[in-house]
Image (tube, rainbow, N blue to C red):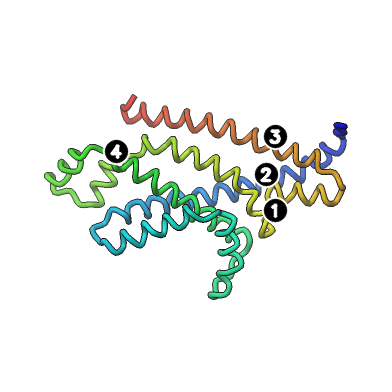
Amino acid sequence: MFDWKWDFAFEILPRLGWATLNTLMAAGGGYAIAIVLGLVLALAQRTPLRLLTFVVREFVEFIRSTPLVLQIFFVFYVAPQFGIRLSPWTSGMIAIGLHYAAYLSEVYRGGIESVPKGQWEACRSLSMSTRDTYVRVIIPQALPPALAGMGNYLVGIFKDTPMLSVIGVAELMHAANAIGSEHYRFLEPYTLVGLIFLAISLPSAALIRVFETWVRKKLGLS
């Protein structure tokens, strides 16, 4: 029988609200790491140094082929054995950042490879440095095709933050589990968590599409 208690739901909302802020911080921090590191990994696979390209490519495949929860455990529990001790928050953001950087590197790579070869040849004919070629010509053209994938992974990161509860990060699912265990009621906290995720994910996806359209218009691509 459906036994929803409104008074209990309103009582736990402030606690879930704080957990939502924690979730957004974890997702934002992880995504910031992923954006920067993903671009570094993508560019590292395009260097003339074959050994570096091979190592980076295998690293990306390793990260993409193993589950995020395992990587979270590794950063938090295994890294201290090598003298690297991190808080649950830091461990969680680094693990999420590394995991999604591997995926974003492929998104960047696809965007870079979509740039016509004539653009590269024109830059070489103008004696432009590699840095200027990427910064002024290639990346601005590679960004629009990559925006859709980047946006999808932003939403994906937000939905994967509940995995951080396994190392004690006080995000939404961690708070819901704690509330349910304290009051022996899981219907309200779990339902509210689902609604909160939905309320954030749907507008985020819509804003990403609007931003993608704006960038394309700004660059004269649509």
Instruction: Determine which residue is flagged by label 3.
Output: 195
Residue 202 in the image: x percent, y percent? 59, 31
Looking at the image, residue 119 sits to the left or right of residue 106; the answer is: left
Residue 128 in the image: x percent, y percent? 17, 48
Residue type highlighted by circle 2: Thr
Instruction: Determine which residue is flagged by label 1.
Output: 170
Identify the image quadrant of the C terminus: top left
**Mark 1: few, some, or many residues within 10 Å (few <14, many ≥20)?**
many
**Helix, strand or loop for disc 1:** loop
Image quadrant in which you'd find residue 6 = top right
**Mark 2: few, some, or many residues within 10 Å (few <14, many ≥20)?**
many
Q: Can you name the residue that lies furthest to the top here?
A: 222
**Mark 4: few, some, or many residues within 10 Å (few <14, many ≥20)?**
some
Instruction: Determine which residue is flagged by label 2.
Output: 20
| Nearest to N terminus: mark 4 or mark 3 | 4
Q: Alpha carbon of mark 1 to alpha carbon of mark 2: how far?
A: 9 Å
Residues at discs 1 and 2 in contact (Cβ within 8 Å)? no
Viewer-side residue, 157 vs 57: 57
Residue type highlighted by circle 3: Leu
Residue 107 in the image: x percent, y percent? 39, 43
